Amino acid sequence: LVIESLCKGNTVMEVNVTAMDNYDLVELKGRIDSLTAPQLSDTLTEITHQNIYKIILDMSDVSYVSSAGLRVLIDIQKTCKKLDQGEVLLINIPKRVYETLELAGFVPLFKFFNNVSSAISAF
Amino acid sequence: MSVQPSQHSEKNKFDYTKIREFINLTEILTSQKNLETQFNDIVKILQKSFACNIQIWLSEICVKLGRFDELDNKVSILSQLSPIMEKASFEKHIIPNPESIANETNFPMVIASPLIIEDRLWGIIQVEKIDKVCFSYEDFNFIKSLSNILSLGINQYWQEYHNDELNNIISDLKSIVQINQSIFSDLNRDSLQNSTVSLLYQKFGFTRVNLYTVREDDKHHYLQTGISCDGIVMRVIHVGEEESNPFAWCNEHQEIVVINDTHDDDRFPLTLFERDTNSELVVPLFQGEQFIGALELCSDRLNIFDVATINNYKLIADTITFAIRNANLYQSEHMSRFVGERLQEVIGSLSVDISLDVVFNKILEEISKFIDYDGGAIWLIDSADNGPGVDQYSSKFHLAAFQVKSRLSREIQLTRSGDSNEQLDHFIQNKYDANELFQMHPWAFEVINANIAKIREPSSVYEPLGALLDYKNDYSAIGMPLVVKNQSIGVIIFVHHLSEQYGNETKSLVSVIANYASIAIENTRLYAVAHDQAWVSTVLLQIAEATQSITNLDELLETVVGILPDLIGVQACAVFLWDPSIEAFVIGGSNGFDEEQSARLEAWDLSSGSVIAFEKLKEFISPIVLNSDTISDEIATSIFPNYDLDNELLILFPLITQNNICGALLVDFTSSNLDINSSQEVWDEKYTLIQGAARQAAIAIENLQLVKSQEEEAYISVALLQVAQAIVSLNQLEEILGSIVRITPILVGVKRCIIYLWDEKELVFRQSQYFGFSRSDLELMGQVIKGNEYPFIDAIHKSNQIIYHPLGINHSPLSWSEISAGEYLVLEEMKSEHDVEVSVRITDRSLNMRERLLIGFPISIKSENLGVMLIEEEDLVRGTPSQHIREKRIEIVKGITQQAAIAIKNELLQQEAVKSEIMERELQLAREIQAAFLPDKIPQYPGWDFDVRWQPARQVGGDFYDILCLDQDKIGIVIADVADKGMPAALFMTLIRTLIRAAAKEKPSPSSVLKQVNELLIPDTKNGMFVTVFYGVLSLRSGKFVYANCGHNPPILKQTNRDELIELTRTGMALGIFSDIDIDDRELIIHRGDWLMLYTDGITEAFSLQGEMYGTERLFTTLLDNDFTNPKSLLDVVEGSVFKFIDGADLSDDMTLTAIFREKA
């Protein structure tokens, strides 16, 4: 499937996790759609399984988020906020992705920042 | 005739009595409750005062207010107005007019006095003197006053009556609303029926209320929920054609039955009714055109049903119909989902340790929670090569699982006390005897070939279960074929002793079950096959281990016959070798026969042409059964005097090398647990095993012969040919690899060999087949190996080259993983000029030939690495060690690994194909479910034009649209998208659809509908699942459109007088995430000439081959560039534009479009 989508000229998603002192920084690249969403979900679940609930998602290079992608974001946000232990913060969100969140009414579920440092102070 | 006016003095006196009368009268009238008494009193007073005739005319309403037929005889009620009355009615005044009379001398002898209050004419009283004395002026006033009092009385009476009526109507309406509300929110059908009858009983004071609902399209059986003073009773009733009670009549004629007096109805004799029933109403329930039941209302009062009340009950009946439909939908869909989940759990619990039988029985047990059955069974077809049709004469069946409910089995025991059902016992204990049963009761064949669930007709022939349980002929049965890969593999049947127990609901449930059962069977079969293979390969491994170190032919043959009987579980065996020099088979050894029999076999003359069985063996190269066809009587008596060959099983297996017979293996199955009646499966297993043993024995034999001849080149090609044959003749990967690791030692003489397969997904190596390792070593070496844990394997895999490492004398396989990067050497591969021939050369000539090597081979095709094979050279006890032989050996093993690579790749491709087939089947099911729940036709309303497009993606998304008819003027328009794909999306969509439909009937505003749906959804959503919904209510007359948009793509409105497009943006968050969310309503008017288009993200998020997204801008441009006159042209253009854009790329999501045009004036 990955090859198939490569053939179509679509970029595949890349996930890069950096563990920081009290949070994890997750850099995302490419498309979060029904093909790549499971991979993102696995990565994020792995983080929360280590009892890390403060997560910063760097969305700067995300080109597209489908409804499957939105599900992953909501799911992980619910998990992180469940016991007031943390939160998922979004930084550098491209306009088009923000509009997708806005369309479904999910903007109030997330906080948005321009860079990591301003996000950290919000934890 | 002249008339004298009364005297003034008399008038005064008269006045006085009149006034007294007046006072009396008012007292009487105010204390009277009864209108006819009031009339009687007034008449009495008039007649007391005058000698007169009194005639009365009453208005239509007034007639209703009292029983005027009971008035005194002296009064006559006129049905038509007299001339003077007509004048009074017209002028609404007493006639003659007193003012005109005052100036006249001639007073009249007839007076007509209207009964009037506030312009409402109740009636007219006409008083006619019979004593020829004229009325005086005072008489006039007296009569007028009396009339007024009477009018007041009537009016008061009417007011009371009217209030009663009004109150009744109000309370009826209240009750209806209440009933509607409470039954709409009830999605459980039983409790729905209960609460409906209870409410009707309480609110309307009927003596009994019955609700009949048809049992799943079965015209003759109804579920009756009845309530009376005895409480609620639910039961199933049968409506035969011969009965003629009101319900049966309603059932037959399908129209409303009104009986206002049970004592006087031509259609029904009084005896049909309960004693306390005086009036009765039966309202049919129609779902569309379909009659689904009736509501029966009985009262002890007479004449209680008039047009108005009947309409009310019709209204309630409509509501009940809707509620039942909703409940049915909800229940069957919830049910299917629930059943699916439960069965999935059962299937999920499958493992190697659980046998097929256990799984089937578990499935039957699980199903008993959903389907009421007395007996259930699963039969499987043994022979799968019959093609798609299953033939009752050639297919073999065996019973795979069987359950009889304990309640029933007790009954059986009771009815047959002592004489237990022998047939049933026989059936359970001899599961392979099913065929005879099927031949006798062929209904099961109909089921298997039907492809869908089949319900037995009461008059049908018996199916096997019903026959065994000895049911009456009208018992119920439902069956469904189990299908895997379009092939029927079995059948599942449930029976119930009562008649007509199963209908459409059960049918769809059984379909779901059969689907899951098929998957379970397939899975379990795969497990079972893997399990069997493990056993087979263990046995073959032992044979290989036992034979590989033997260098002497006699010893080898002895070993083979020595271990076979115990390993395979047969009585005895003997091996014969073909000796071409004398053209005869010669016995090589036997085991398990008694001495006399052994001697007979030793003495057997097997020269060419003398024994038919051996001739056939050479001709067909396949196993031959020894019987009267293959063994002459003479031989049978001389060689097999103790065998009854036609009833005992002796089979001759060929020992084959390169399609030539090198010998034969005679196996005696007598008194083993295998007999002619054993199932195909058991037989297949043993058969495979013996064939494998025979093959291995043959290879060993030939190898020994070849070693003798020392023909090396021939040896290599023969060796590879043998491997190739093994691969071609087997079709399971593990079997092939097992065969490879067993053949390799025989061919090239290695001490140990093992294959690891590369798992591309998990990035690990998995231990596959092996030879020469102790169990404990294997365990310690690990089943799953990560590259970094085992540098030697990792190096082979990464370099894709053959590498080796010298092993010390006491080197254990456990230390292989410790060989580090610097310690191994890469084997140089020599390529000829044309890169065609490849040979290997060990460059390190200093290598001590006495040192054994561990050699690792990549198993790869082109550059794709599929695994590695490790071999450990054998201890050099045999032959002269030479570098040359070592190189040849490596060449052979390299050839073997190439064969292995082909087999592995083949298997991987096959797995993918199977996986995609299963997925495809699920997708198909999901598509069907989804399509079934979308409206099949778009309703059309005058002044409006609707059109819809729905294009499912290959991987079904959860789009749906719906158009609800709310009332005569209002319709609800829904478009929604579930954030999921495949089966879960389809099922979720049906749930939301039902919830919206239920809520839309209850709640007036779109926002409140979606709020309720959201709350009901929350418990069902998992993993961030959500659904975007747009729901609007359109008033057809005014064009008013009230909507709520929960995170859905904004529908687009184009107004006729404006150039830009208006988006109906979000008024709330998508549903299913948080409870208690804020949703607003918005309102606009769709004017004449305007249009509205609704769509899902499948449109805007359609991707081109270049990965570009269609997007809203493109959509807007498309919409603005064209002038649309009807919805079809609009949708054609939009759809065309999207398809052109994606240019043949797959749809990534469902595409749904709805367009609504309001026609121009």
Image (cartoon, rainbow, N blue to C red):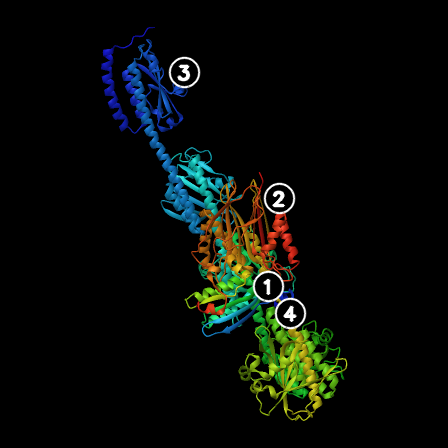
**Mark 3 → mark 4, Cα distance in angstroms:** 106 Å
The crowd level at tag 4 (other Cα within 10 Å; few <14, some 14-19, many 20+) is few
In the image: residue B879, left or right of residue B101: right
Q: Nearer the viewer, mark 3 or mark 2?
A: 2
Viewer-proximal residue among B1131 and B765: B1131
User: Disc 2 on helix, strand or loop?
Assistant: loop
Q: Are marks 3 and 2 on the same chain?
A: yes
The crowd level at tag 2 (other Cα within 10 Å; few <14, some 14-19, many 20+) is some
Callouts 3 and 2 close, C-beta under 8 Å: no
Amino acid type at image mark 1: Ile
Task: Provide the residue designation for mark 1.
Answer: B918
Quarter in which the C terminus of chain B is drawn:
top right
Task: Provide the residue designation for mark 3.
Answer: B83
Q: Are marks 3 and 4 on the same chain?
A: yes
Q: Chain of mark 1?
A: B
User: Disc 3 on helix, strand or loop?
Assistant: helix
Q: Chain of mark 4?
A: B
Task: Provide the residue designation for mark 4.
Answer: B909
**Mark 3 → mark 1, Cα distance in angstroms:** 93 Å
